[in-house]
Image (cartoon, helix red, strand yellow):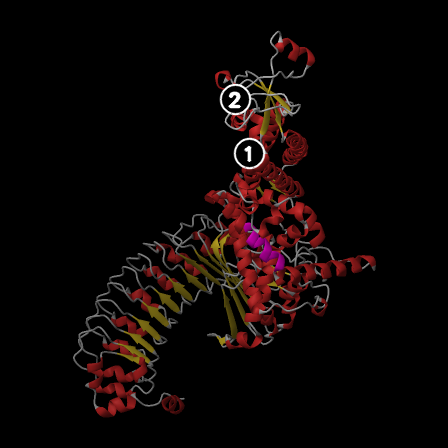
Amino acid sequence: MFTLAEVASLNDIQPTYRILKPWWDVFMDYLAVVMLMVAIFAGTMQLTKDQVVCLPVLQSTVNSKAQASTSGKADFTTVEATTGQGEAKDSSGRKTNLDFQQYVFINQMCYHLALPWYSKYFPYLVLIHTIILIVSSNFWFKYPKTCSKIEHFVSILGKCFESPWTTKALSETACEDSEENKQRLTGASSLPKYVSTSSDEGSPSATTPMITKSGFKFSADKPMIEVPSVTILDKKDGEQAKALFEKVRKFRAHVEDSDLIYKLYVGQTVIKTVKFIFILCYTANFVNTISFEHICNPKVEHLIGYTQFECTHNMAYMLKKLLISYISLICVYGFICLYTLFWLFRIPLKEYSFEKVREESSFSDIPDVKNDFAFLLHMVDQYDQLYSKRFGVFLSEVSENKLREISLNHEWTFEKLRQHVSRNAQDKQELHLFMLSGVPDAVFDLTDLDVLKLELIPEAKIPAKISQMTNLQELHLCHCPAKVEQTAFSFLRDHLRCLHVKFTDVAEIPAWVYLLKNLRELYLIGNLNSENNKMIGLESLRELRHLKILHVKSNLTKIPPNITDVAPHLTKLVIHNDGTKLVVLNSLKKMTNVAELELQSCELERIPHAIFSLSNLQELDLKSNSIRTIEEIISFQHLKRLTCLKLWHNKIVNIPSSITHIKNLESLYLSNNKLESLPAAVFSLQKLRCLDVSYNSILLIPVEIGLLQNLQHFHITGNKIDVLPKQLFKCVKLRTLSLGQNCITSIPDKISQLVQLTHLELKGNCLDRLPATLGQCQLLRKSGLVVEDHLFDALPSEVKEVLNQDTSIPFANGI
């Protein structure tokens, strides 16, 4: 027989699983234990005391059967039998002719023949049924594909419930709610959601992504000291909370994709209900078979001499009472099963809403869950709804972002940020933050910062504390759709002068960018085309009334019409198109005040005619296009202020003589083209100070170059020059002379006439020596001389000594 401990182990589950046991499961477990005790008690009694006692029915010589049937009693007659141990008699002294062994034999036979099977196997049936019910109740805890999910869920739920971060987050929201309620009760009027305190016109629109009242915040409407002070989370607790957020995210993704746990629980409940109905039906049929008296006909008359025996079952009374108790327990068990089924199908258990939790905790972003995740939470609610409330903290992105913010502030202190501040090329103090979870609060304590770069910070928030950074004039947002508070926006609108925004999609540009009315420079780098490149997604720039410089690096097919909003006051327009052909350029005509225009990588084949209308144009850069001919250059004679023309990195074959009409041209860049010669017309530009024709196929330098008396920078690197004309050295104002990667065999001694020369490039030629007269170039030093080492070493020692002198001495003497 089973021991109680062995059978009870079937119902043994982990203590932590009790949170997934609603009251009906607990009640049914207790009922199962009672039924188990009934089975064990009945089985024990049956093994030890179960038996039948039989006596023969004595037959009269005339009509014993008729008398037995009419009287209901056995009439006993005297029958003589001889035994070795004496004669057997009945209680009245009459002989029965049976001895003890024959009674034992008859009792054993009648136990199996006369006693109903239900009386014999009732305890075992109860035991089997109870074991099946216990297994059905706990199968979802044991089945591999569900127990693993349940185990993870219970583990995560317990850690979330006990996490210090849960207590901190709920405490802060409770404090925030009390502050907001206090403001409402005192009649404090709150500012409109997106409207600045200033009365200026540049207020954010309704679509401006400001930091709103929902979730955690540093409100601009109240001082920072009013943030509720709670226990600071130490680093270990913070790391554990981060790990919990990640576990919850992965568990949710793993569990929400199926409803196996729900189906299994429903299935085992249906099995228990069917089992209850089956037990009740067949037990009711066998209740009356448990009786105290039984008639036995063993058919062994040839051995004993009697055909019929009347037997008594000594356990009948006890079994009857146990059966009634068992049926009562089964009925209660069945009603609970029916209630469970009613609960399972009454409400949608595969959907779980945190609406109540959102209302109570102010976590407006806690998502609703579905499938097995929802079912497990419904089961937990039957135990204690506090679990769901505390668990919801780890489903909230606001809560996770707040945790990241606290951890971030612990890690990035003021001292650490100060160490990352550097000086940029403009000698400004610059701080670059890369791939952080947010913007540390200590950043806004760096009041002397000039440039702030935020890169790959998706949850960047700019609070009111930025108003302390009075020196801040330049902001970089690289894949960082930053949100700003109202007070912070007012500060940026009035103080920010330069803004760089790098994005993947135009929708990532924060809406408040278009409202910075005092902005001077705007740099946009990213895809400005909307879906299918049918239209430009850039919003209106009308509010940028003081914008002077607009830099766009994108893949435009036409100039965005919104740029014309700032056309009247724009002085510099730069478009880098990354190889996409720019077709429509008529909008350029409206930019009458543009002084610098740069159209790079726009696949232009000719100089756009719209440029000729820009009367104030001073510098034109058409780098990296597909321009082959520049015959239109004659139209530049109308651009009286044009001083710099950059046509480098194109496919230009020749320079037309009409270039002489650009009288005021001071800089001409024609490098990386396909030029084979320089026409004399180029050297009629008397104001030319910089000429760059590097990396072409030019064979010689015309003698007319001596006419350029104002030439200061001449670059002809990477051509096929073999001889330097003497007239070149008449350009006595030359400071930079780049002659590298040519075929020059010698440098004339007249190079000494270039007394202002500071940079001389000769590397990559066919020189065998350098002239000693290089020492007479007073401003030339070794750092500015680009030549092979062996040529420099071959110079006279006094010349090398002069070239190696400190640069500060010649400048002082020369000037």
From where the camera sits, is residue 208 visible? Answer: no
At label 1, counting other C-alpha atoms closer than 10 Å, the crowd grade (few under 14, some 14-19, many 20 or more) is some
The front one of 330 and 180 is 330
Residue 617 in the figure: left or right of residue 175:
left
Quarter occupied by the C terminus: bottom left
Q: Quadrant of residue 409?
A: bottom right
- Relative to 742, say whether 44 is above or below: above
Highlighted range, magenta:
153-162
Expressed as whole percent of the image width and height from the top left, the position of residue 259 reads 54, 39
Expressed as whole percent of the image width and height from the top left, the position of residue 185 reads 82, 57
From where the camera sits, is residue 657 visible? Answer: yes
Expressed as whole percent of the image width and height from the top left, the position of residue 773 reads 24, 87
Residue 187 in the figure: left or right of residue 654:
right
Expressed as whole percent of the image width and height from the top left, the position of residue 248 reads 55, 53
Residue 158 inside the magenta-drawn segment: yes
Q: Secondary structure at mark 2?
A: loop
Amino acid type at mark 2: Thr
Residue pictured at 73% horizontal, 55% vertical: 192
- Relative to 285, say whether 591 is above or below: below
The front one of 373 and 792 is 373
Q: Quadrant of residue 371?
A: top right
At label 2, counting other C-alpha atoms closer than 10 Å, the crowd grade (few under 14, some 14-19, many 20 or more) is few
Q: Secondary structure at mark 1?
A: helix
The front one of 488 and 616 is 488
Residue at the extreme right of the image, as rendered: 186
Q: Which residue is mark 1?
A: 124
Q: Quadrant of residue 96?
A: top right
- Relative to 375, say whether 560 is above or below: below
Residue 763 inside the magenta-drawn segment: no
User: Which of the two discs, 1 and 2, sits closer to the camera?
Assistant: 2
Q: Which residue is mark 2?
A: 82
Amino acid type at mark 1: Tyr
